[in-house]
Image (tube, helix red, strand yellow):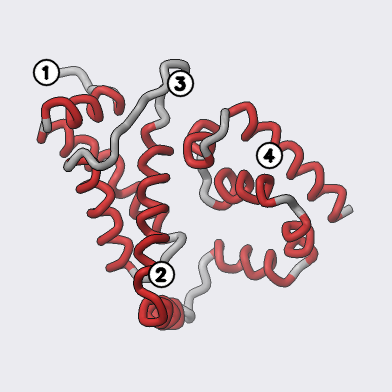
Amino acid sequence: MSATKSDGELLRAIAADSDRHAFEELYRRYAPWLTARLRGRCADPSVVDDVVQETFLAIWRGKARYQQDRSTTGDAAGWLWRIGSRRLVDTLRGDGARGRLRQTLARLRHRDEASAEERVLAGVEHGDLAGALVRLSPELRAVLQATVVDGLTTREAAVLLGIPPGTVKTRAMRARKQLREALA
C-alpha cells in the first residue's frame, strides 16, 4: 500500500514526469472543491465545468507551474483557486453580452429557492453593511472577499492575493475593526 502523497509531491510529479496517476489524484482531491467555489461566482454550471476543465488542463500541459514556497505548505488549494478564478473572469469577459444574458437567465431559473448566501448578500447590498463595505479600501475588501465570502484560509488568501499571510491577518483585523466602528 502506497502512502498518500502531499499536494506538492503530486504537482511536482505532474510537472516533472507527466505522471497521470498524480494528476488523477490531484483532480479527485480538488475538482469538486474548485467546482463548488466557482459556482459561488458563476450561475452557469456549464461555464464552471469548462473553467475547471481548463484549469486542470493548464496544469497537465505545464502552462501553470506550481512554485511551493519553502516556508509554507498546503498552499496548493490557493494556487488552484487563483488559476480557476482568473480563468473564470477571462471566460466571462470573453462571453460578453451573451454570457451575461446566460448568467442572468440561469439565476432567474433558480429564483424560487433563495440560498442562505443569497439572503445574506441581499442584506449586505441593502443594509448598513453595504455602505460600510464600500468605504473600506480595496485591499481590505479583497481580504474580506477571500476569507469571508470565499471561505479561504489565511494561507490560501495570501496565495490568491499575492501577499504574505501576516498581511492577510493584519488587513482582516483592520477591516473588522473599521466595520465594527461603522456599524456601531
Q: Identify the residue under disc 4.
A: 172
Distance of label 2 from label 1 (alpha carbons):
41 Å
- Whichever of callouts 3 and 4 sits on the residue coming sooner in the sequence is 3
Specify the amino acid type for callout 4.
Answer: Ala
Q: Is residue 48 left or right of residue 123?
A: left
168 lies above or below 119: above
- Whichever of callouts 3 and 2 sits on the residue coming sooner in the sequence is 2
Q: Identify the residue under disc 1.
A: 1
Q: Identify the residue under disc 2.
A: 43
Mark 4 Cα shell of 10 Å, populated few (<14), some (14-19), many (≥20): many
**Mark 2 or mark 1, which is nearer to you?**
2
Q: Secondary structure at mark 2?
A: loop
Pointers 4 and 2 in contact (C-beta within 8 Å)? no
To which quarter of the image does residue 121 belong? bottom right
**Mark 1 or mark 4, which is nearer to you?**
4
Distance of label 4 from label 2 (alpha carbons):
28 Å
Q: Secondary structure at mark 4?
A: helix
To which quarter of the image does residue 39 belong? bottom left
29 lies above or below 44: above
Q: Nearer the viewer, residue 17 or 124?
A: 17
Q: Is residue 171 left or right of residue 69?
A: right
